[in-house]
Amino acid sequence: MDIEIAIEKTDNPKPLPSDESFGFGKYFTDHMFITEYSKLLGWHAPRIVPYQNLRLDPGAAVLHYGQAIFEGMKAFRGTDGKIRLFRPEMNWKRMKESAERLCLEFVDLPVFIESLLRLVRTDVHWVPSKAGTALYLRPTLIGSEAFLGVRAAENLMYYVIASPVGGYYGSNAIEPVKIWVERKYSRAAPGGMGAAKAGGNYAASLKAASEAKKRGFAQVLWLDASKKEYVEEVGTMNVFFKIGDTVITPPLGGTILPGITRDSVIQLLRESKTPIEERPISLSEILEAHKTGDLKEVFGTGTAASISPVGAFGVNDELISINGGKVGTLSSELYQTLTDIQYGRRPDPLGWTMEVSL
Ligand code: COI
């Protein structure tokens, strides 16, 4: 499909940061993609422009009623020099579902894909090549209509920005993180918007995350909103538990984000004939398995976090160490397989990667 996208290049390219200094989301590339929606025109004027502030009316819906959703994805530069996206159609599908939950219109799949490809091509020298680094892409959809009545906005903006990143937790390699089991605050309730990648879900998570950080933990493990017993997800990741020889992850039931790395890991485990169960898992079951020595490994999955082993849980006053605080074999194998596919170091039989032709 031929989609006409105007390209306006910057006259002032920024200096490239060194890859040791990336961290996560600190730097932004020279350009961005943007297109607007109105009831009259539909989606129109798709364009690449120099990275810039948005022109938003102070009465815009997003600033008052939080109509904002986003995606997180990465462009990987392989050892073969090729640049690949990872399952981008899954991000579109999830963004479309998030949009529906928040009463937002969204662009069709070809426009979404083209928005990513054009931005990556325009800022191609920003795609880093060092192991563990990537160009993180942030497709974002907001209600831009200036109107204070509470209803869905009729004017919208969809834009994509990009940021060269290393590991989410600071290191570009796989390293265990400490997670606080949150028993006071909730992230999402049944019937709410927990399955949508909505900015508001992250706003709701900040209080617990900052309290956990003060206690020395990287993120929180969320439990179900009503009983505070069943595990849901970690701050920016889905979560997996290896108990005995079986891997268990909570099922998607509307309160959990349907992670694309989560789905990929489930498929990789099935392929390697590792027993994998998507079922409710309670905190008591985890603590019991820890007591009996059956809790072998815990790891989180996410685009930003990749595969992140959990080295310890903080439960009330107790610190529960997992696998002696070390990276487990399964986490490390999954990290290797997943990143090998993403960086083009091994074949991609499931067709997960999309090469960015330059
Ligand atoms: C991602 O993994 O891409 C996320 O969106 C998580 C977070 C950084 C918000």
Image: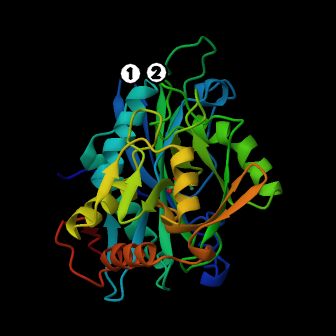
Label 2: element kind: loop
The spot of residue 2 in percent (x, y) is 20, 53
Residue furthest right as drawn = 214
Q: Residues within 10 Å of mark 1 (few under 14, many from 20)?
A: few
CB-based contact (under 8 Å), mark 1 and mark 2: yes
Vertical position of residue 239 compared to residue 13: above or below: above
In the image, what residue occupies the spot 55% across and 24% down?
145
- Cα separation, mark 1 vs mark 2, equals 6 Å
Q: Which image quadrant for residue 217?
A: bottom right
Q: Amino acid at mark 1?
A: Lys
Residue closer to the observer: 39 or 192: 192
In the image, what residue occupies the spot 27% across and 68% down?
353
Residue closer to the observer: 188 or 339: 188
In the image, what residue occupies the spot 40% across and 64% down?
244
Looking at the rendered image, the quarter that the C terminus falls into is bottom left
The spot of residue 177 in percent (x, y) is 63, 67
Residue 154: numbered disc: 2
* Residue 113 makes an appearance in the image: no
The numbered mark, 1 or 2, whose residue comes first in the sequence reads: 1
Q: Amino acid at mark 2?
A: Glu
Answer yes or no: disc 2 within 8 Å of ligand 1. no
Residue closer to the observer: 65 or 234: 234
**Can you identify the residue that label 1 sits on?**
39
Q: Residues within 10 Å of mark 2 (few under 14, many from 20)?
A: some
Q: How is the image coloured?
A: rainbow
The spot of residue 102 in percent (x, y) is 46, 27
Residue furthest bottom as drawn = 80
The spot of residue 194 in percent (x, y) is 50, 34
Vertical position of residue 201 compared to residue 296: above or below: above
Residue 198: numbered disc: none
Is 4 on the left or on the right of 100, as rendered? left
Vertical position of residue 301 compared to residue 125: above or below: above
